[in-house]
Image (cartoon, helix red, strand yellow):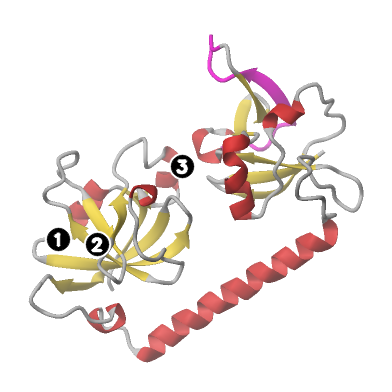
Amino acid sequence: MNRVYQVKVVGLTFNNPSHNVEAGEYVILKADEHNKFDKDAVAVYNSDAELIGHVANSERTLSLNNRKNGNIGASELKGNLDFTGKEFYGEVIKAFSSYLYLEVNEGKWSYINRSVPTVAIADTVGISEVDVLKSEIESLKAIVSDLQDQVISLKTILTVDSEDNSSPTTSNGRVLYSVVGLSHFDGQDHLGYDLSIVEEPIFEGAKGTAFYLKSGKHRVGVFPSAKKKSYCEEHGIPYCESKQLKGKSFEGNVIIEEIVYNEYAVVSI
């Protein structure tokens, strides 16, 4: 049975491919032998052979939580797969604007032969039409499930004016807020404590402060700045700029309504 490896692809914002890949698509992985920054670099290309990014291979791009979720770095991937004269194919499991998550099957590869015209990835890796259709059906099921969840959410969340920077509320009057950057903190692993919203220095001795969601003494995430507005819109979660929280009184229990590990959480107050 072929082994499957999980990897994270970063650097998407530094490239300009003709189209962005989506979940369910296949991408091409090749050893980037001429990369002057990382001898173990693995480049990732779309089906049009356009560079879209590289497999994460440092603590800065592959967090401890990423590793806890089963992702490995490029050095480990090359230690398990022989890229000599070969290109491997990875299936996109999750696609975001700045990074991707892939599953790379050791049995899905082909020899690199630049004299042979490019063919469809499905044919190259030996995936039958039936398998492709099954994959598309599963993707559609996931989309339908996601839409159903959004419909349920819309039934409980009251729509607010898009130009209003206030946060939406639930049908029972609780105000919804989002916190982001969960992969930077350890609080998502310590959710058994009372939740609180605290303004405190970004780091010890810093003059700048931010609003954090905390579980006991652990930071879970940070309330978004103006720079994170597009991130919130992209993920369909409430946006309220953190500076709007200054002077507000947070009475009552803070409840997590939704959490996506390593990404964001939606809380109600």
> Is 178 placed left or right of 181 in the picture?
right
Tag in front: 1 or 2: 2
Q: Which mark is residue 29?
A: 2
Q: Which quadrant is home to the N terminus?
A: bottom left
The answer to whether 124 appears left or right of 221 in the picture is left
Viewer-nearest residue: 138 or 11? 11
- How many numbered circles does the render carry? 3
What element does badge 1 sit on?
A: loop
Q: Distance between the residues labelled 2 and 3?
A: 23 Å
Image coordinates for residue 142, horizontal then vertical, percent: 58, 72
Q: In this view, does 133 lie to the left or right of 6?
A: right
Type of amino acid at the residue the image marks with label 2: Leu
CB under 8 Å between callouts 2 and 3?
no
Distance between mark 1 and mark 3 Cα atoms: 27 Å
Label 1 packing within 10 angstroms: few (<14), some (14-19), many (20+): many
Which numbered marker is on residue 83? 1
Q: What stretch is highlighted in magenta?
A: 189-206
Q: Quadrant of the C terminus?
A: top right
Q: Is residue 34 above or below residue 210?
A: below
In the displayed structure, 207 sits above or below 189; it is above
Residue behind mark 3: 65
Q: Which amino acid does label 1 sit on?
A: Phe
Q: Nearer the viewer, mark 1 or mark 3?
A: 1
Q: Residues within 10 Å of mark 3 (few under 14, many from 20)?
A: some
Q: Is residue 116 magenta?
A: no
